[in-house]
Image: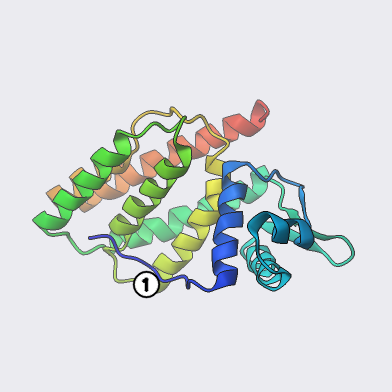
Amino acid sequence: MATQIDMGDSLPNVVADELRALIVRGTLLPGEHLGQTQLADRFGRSKVPIREALKLLAAEGFLRHDHNRGYFVAPLELEEARQLYKLRRWLEAELLATAVWPTDAQIAEFRRQFDALDAMDQVSDFTNWALALENLRLALFALSPERILLREATRLWRLTDRYRSLMPRTMGESPERKLIDALAARDRDALLADYMQARSKIEDALEQVFQHGR
């Protein structure tokens, strides 16, 4: 069963979710100015929740704020990506190292989620594919009782999703299958080794994107 983290459903959070999705998909481009009046018209909201949503996204790192000019979509920078993924490595490895072995029913649910994810077309349905991946990822890492680490990991997922969107949408099968197999076998060494191998592949792909131009 997937574990949900309640991020709140207030109007500013709803607007922030909508804006975040547009940034991750690349609809709102790095450096683009986000005017409160234009956003209020676009979403059919008043300026108050728009302003609060912009503050939330700036605190998360999705936006940059200039006191004179307003809010801008944060640039994509290789050094930032390196540090974010380094943090993810540490947090996620700790979560897997402390994961409680799942039941047979949980393994079956993980496999069902993976099969649904694997059947999706990353190119034509990237938004839903990314959401399905996030749900499966959360379910796997939520096996750990380290709730503060999990909370921080989910925050980093949001930030690194911007960079994932730069990479080819056809990188092959998602590595979660190997993680599920290792969990089913209760093999901690294989679980951590497969995780590190998958991280290295994704990070190498990102380096290539920046080296050869986006």
Q: Give 159 or 201, whichever is nearer the viewer.
A: 159
In the rendered image, is residue 56 in sight?
Answer: yes
Using the image, determine if residue 54 lies above or below residue 202.
below
Q: Give 168 or 92, whichever is nearer the viewer.
A: 168
Q: Give 93 or 1, whichever is nearer the viewer.
A: 1
Q: Is residue 79 left or right of residue 157?
A: right
Figure quadrant of the N terminus? bottom left
In the rendered image, is residue 177 in sight?
Answer: no
Q: Quadrant location of residue 143? A: bottom left
Residue depicted at x 46% and y 38%: 126
Q: Is residue 38 left or right of residue 22?
A: right
Outermost left residue: 104
Q: Where is residue 208? Give x, y as percent.
A: 58, 29
Residue depicted at x 40% and y 66%: 150
Using the image, determine if residue 152 lies above or below residue 157.
below
Using the image, determine if residue 49 lies above or below residue 76.
below
Task: Sort mark 1 into few (<14), some (14-19) or many (20+) by Cα contacts within 10 Å.
Answer: some
What residue is shown with label 1? 147
Q: Where is residue 148? Give x, y as percent.
A: 42, 73
Q: Where is residue 42? Give x, y as percent.
A: 68, 54
Residue depicted at x 34% and y 71%: 146
Q: Is residue 135 left or right of residue 159?
A: left
Figure quadrant of the C terminus? top right
